[in-house]
Image (tube, grey):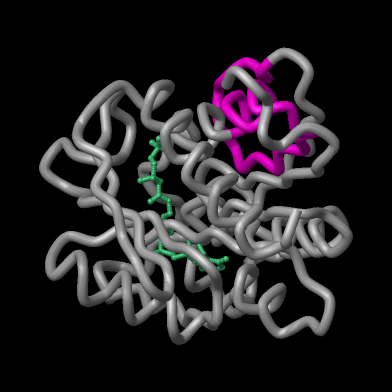
Amino acid sequence: FGEQPLRGRTVVVSAGPTYEDIDPVRFIGNRSSGRMGFAVAAAARDAGAEVTLVAGPVSLPTPHGVRRIDVRSARQMHEAVLAEASAADIYIGAAAVGDYRPLEAAAHKLKKADGAPLRLELTENPDIIAALAARAKRPFLVGFAAETSALAAYAQEKLRRKGIDMIAANEVGGGKGFEVADNALHVYWRDGDDTLPEMPKTELARRLVARIAERFLSGSGT
Ligand code: PMT
């Protein structure tokens, strides 16, 4: 970033999975390692922004110069992101937020029931990025879409339904997207799109942030 396009701007990034507790020893999680979101936070810092990273449970070092807030569940991430991002210029949701949580987390470790099936009742978590989109004053909103099929159609549907400004779609499953060092993205906005081919997440994040800065600045009139 020769000219640091995001100098003086505030950016909030979410990264990693969420853990939804079943009982004191078990949880529902997902395969996100946080690598993509941490790379996006570092790239936004390099673009000159003041960056806050809201991180689910991951084992990654905090990028230098980035403020980090650790959370565990989707509801904690919701609270932290809303508090941090409401006044920010840009929010980038790279976290794999759990869509559901157990209706009640058991206070004691669940016991086996003599071979009978164990039923877990799940309830929906709040949609963090859609909650931001519903606010009158809101940051420029960039979501990710993790899909195992029909990438373009699902991503464009999420862009519209969530009412956000851009979406970065990636294929996941079969060794793609989650956990690994490389990734590829297809980025969509209302009247355009761009393909970022497979490359290390660190480089991909820089290309994505450059694209976000361009769209953000063209809309903010600065
Ligand atoms: O962490 P890595 O191992 O590096 O893997 C990277 C990644 C695959 C996790 C990342 O690139 C990615 O795709 N992140 C988004 C994963 C996801 O949950 O996508 P989704 O299609 O379920 O959600 C769409 C968007 O809505 C995302 O921006 C998500 O943060 C947001 N969302 C979803 C649910 C919810 N309750 N609140 C949200 O804000």
Q: Nearer the viewer, residue 90 or 124?
A: 90
Quadrant of residue 64 within the rendered picture: top right
Q: Which image quarter is the N terminus in?
A: top right
Residue 72: horizontal and vertical position, in percent? Answer: 66, 48
Q: Nearer the viewer, residue 17 or 27?
A: 17
Q: Is residue 126 above or below residue 145?
A: below
* Left or right of residue 174: residue 59: right
Q: Is residue 21 above or below residue 30?
A: below
Q: Nearer the viewer, residue 188 or 62?
A: 188
Residue at image point 80% right, 64% down = 82
* Left or right of residue 34: residue 83: right
State the extent of the magenta-drawn residues as a range: 41-63
* Left or right of residue 201: residue 76: right
Residue at image point 64% right, 69% down = 128
Q: Nearer the viewer, residue 62 or 45?
A: 45
Residue 38: horizontal and vertical position, in percent? Answer: 56, 30
Residue 185: horizontal and vertical position, in percent? Answer: 29, 46
Q: Is residue 53 a member of the stretch shown in magenta?
A: yes
Q: Is residue 189 a member of the stretch shown in magenta?
A: no
Residue at image point 43% right, 22% down = 202
Q: Quadrant of ligand 1?
A: bottom left
